[in-house]
Image (cartoon, rainbow, N blue to C red):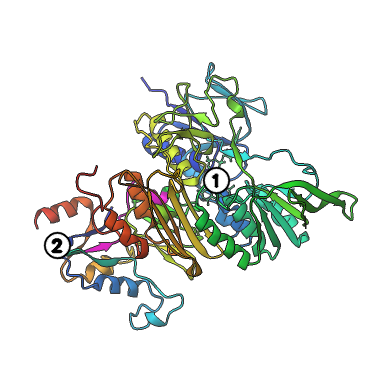
Amino acid sequence: MQKLFFITKRCDGCQACEVACLEKHSQSQSIFMTKMEQPSPQPRIKVKKSGSHYWATVCQHCTDSMCVRACMTGAMQYSLTGEVSHNTNKCVGCWMCIMVCPLGAITTLNEAKKASKCDLCKDEMTPPCAASCSRQALFYGTPEEYEMKVAGD
Amino acid sequence: MRVIDMHYLIIGNSAAGVFAAETIRGLDPDGQITMISNEDCLPYSRCLTSYYLGNEISEEMMYIRDKAFYTETGIDFQVGYVERVDPDSKSVLLESGEKVIYDKLLIATGSSPFNPPLEGSDIGGIFELRTLGDAKAVAEFAPKAKNAVVMGAGLVGLKGAHGLHELGINVTIVGSAPQVLRHSIDIESAEILTRLLEEDGYRVHINTRVTKVLGEEDADGRMSVSGVLLNTGEKIPCQMIIRAVGVRPNVKLVRDSGVAVNYGIIVDEEMQTSVKDIYAAGDVAEAFDLLTGEKGVNAIWPSATEQGIIAGCNMAGVKRNYQGSLALNSAVICGVGIISAGLVNLPSGEGSVLRASEPDKNFYRKFVIKDGCLVGMIMVGDIEGAGILSGLIRKKAKVDVKYLQHMLVNPIEYPGYLPVERGGQ
Ligand SMILES: Cc1cc2nc3c(=O)[nH]c(=O)nc-3n(C[C@H](O)[C@H](O)[C@H](O)COP(=O)(O)OP(=O)(O)OC[C@H]3O[C@@H](n4cnc5c(N)ncnc54)[C@H](O)[C@@H]3O)c2cc1C
């Protein structure tokens, strides 16, 4: 299973990943139009300064996911390839997933009464967040590929 | 020689049963899995009955697994009511007289509404809210009602009240405790919720009991609810009642079987009961609390699924220990989110509390600290990041109090490392 890995020491906090995610998850697919959209789209990755470094919070698609266990609607489920997929049609906005995600990687879309989290942009070769990261602080790949990558750092 | 496939039998096709079955299938592709339930339908979420009642979701959305669930997972689903478990012959007896044998048995029969005796409770127009069938019955009757009384101010009562309110019915909530949601939140947050409910047109009576149901003959000559009498002497006119004062584990099927029962069916760390090869999980199981170690039933969806997974692993021969149940609740009341976790009300003199409150903004946070560890929390209003805190509670690590003080009034964010004190676990 491929997912997003964050390499703290490479991140300079530019937030290009957030912008790319926002655009990708907007109806207009244009960053300039997102401000006008209702309900307003939200990025599913969030970069924050934490002490002297930056930290990007994004769903880690855990193998024994707390959110899948807590979800009372069946909206959070494992896909056949192991990612945690979120079926927004089934979601009722009960926030049970938010109650348990230890990373805080799930947010509320209050107007829509739906939870929101990284879906890995399966229709793209590389998720736009990782593609837009000029410092390659976001790595998209399997855990094995990530291990090799970090070992080479 | 061919190894004979294991036969797993699961009673109950809800949260605990489904997660157990999926876990077993993942670990033992060839084992034979049979699920028995007296509810003849796909697995659904009873947490959603109130949403269905309030026309917020369709029946289709109640189901937590799709039509192909039983066939894709190779589960033999049988409709039936299990009358008795017989450990000696390793079989269960159905109401129909049929006998089903097992190698490993999971009892995931959940709980049922508990209704203390009440004068007039045989009158028409009185309902429970537990099953999809209950929700359909309430929904069918609701158009005849202008006013309703919900007995019980716990989660099921408040959710049921919301469902009726969505239909335009005037709802009065009657709870015997000094606050709403007494098992999951504190008095301060309960006051915020009560005010929100009243602003939205609900009437909320706390510290109050229904002592009698009043009835009158309807057009067809049947007795039908016309109101309730409270212990305060007040009469509240209504045409329907939902009883939601509490639940009891469905343990009848193990009576005299040797399976030890206290309040629920007693289980060990592997979710095994006192009888070998018989496991229990979910609302029916009495496990132990993660924080206090005390035995008890934690009748919530996330505990049921987690216990189902643990039971499934051990039944399939993969040892996995349960860490204990954590009280966790999430509700949305009048559009305002409320999440609580762990021990939210410590006995006075124990531990310390951090609190931030802005009632007019529907914002409230309370963190309960004991021996340097976060042991409980309540969040009202902005609930994002709640899982970071419940995760810290689960970790039982000494927490950096400065971090908690910051989190009290700021957005709760994961700082990239666990905000635990040096020298902590
Ligand atoms: C209205 C409502 C709202 C709720 N909201 C929430 C919420 O917001 N959050 C939360 O965490 N929890 C909530 N809960 C609680 C949650 O639904 C339960 O904790 C959960 O369903 C427990 O799952 P379970 O698998 O243990 O048992 P159950 O869901 O009770 O399922 C047990 C199954 O076994 C079957 N069965 C029982 N006895 C037998 C027998 N002898 N033979 C054959 N079959 C049998 C039953 O018919 C049923 O299908 C709510 C409950 C209700 C009723």
Chain for numbered disc 1 = B
Q: Report the magenta residues as a range.
A: A54-68
Residue A59 can be seen in this image: no
SS at circle 2: helix
Q: Which of these two is toward me, B387 or B78? A: B387
* Same chain letter for marks 1 and 2: no
Chain for numbered disc 2 = A
Q: Is the residue marked by circle 2 packed among few (<14), some (14-19), or many (20+) residues within 10 Å?
A: few
Q: Position of residue B186 (x, y in %)?
A: 50, 52
Please say whether residue A56 is one of the residues in the magenta stretch.
yes
User: Which residue sits at x=85%, y=48%?
Assistant: B223
Q: Which of these two is toward me, B203 or B13? A: B203
Q: Is residue B281 above or below residue B218?
A: above
Q: Say which residue label 2 marks.
A: A9
Q: Is mark 1 within 8 Å of ligand 1?
A: no
Q: Say which residue label 1 marks.
A: B43
Q: Is mark 2 within 8 Å of ligand 1?
A: no
Query: What amino acid does circle 1 point to?
Result: Pro
Q: Is the residue marked by circle 1 packed among few (<14), some (14-19), or many (20+) residues within 10 Å?
A: many
Quadrant holding the N terminus of chain B: top left
Query: What amino acid does circle 2 point to?
Result: Lys
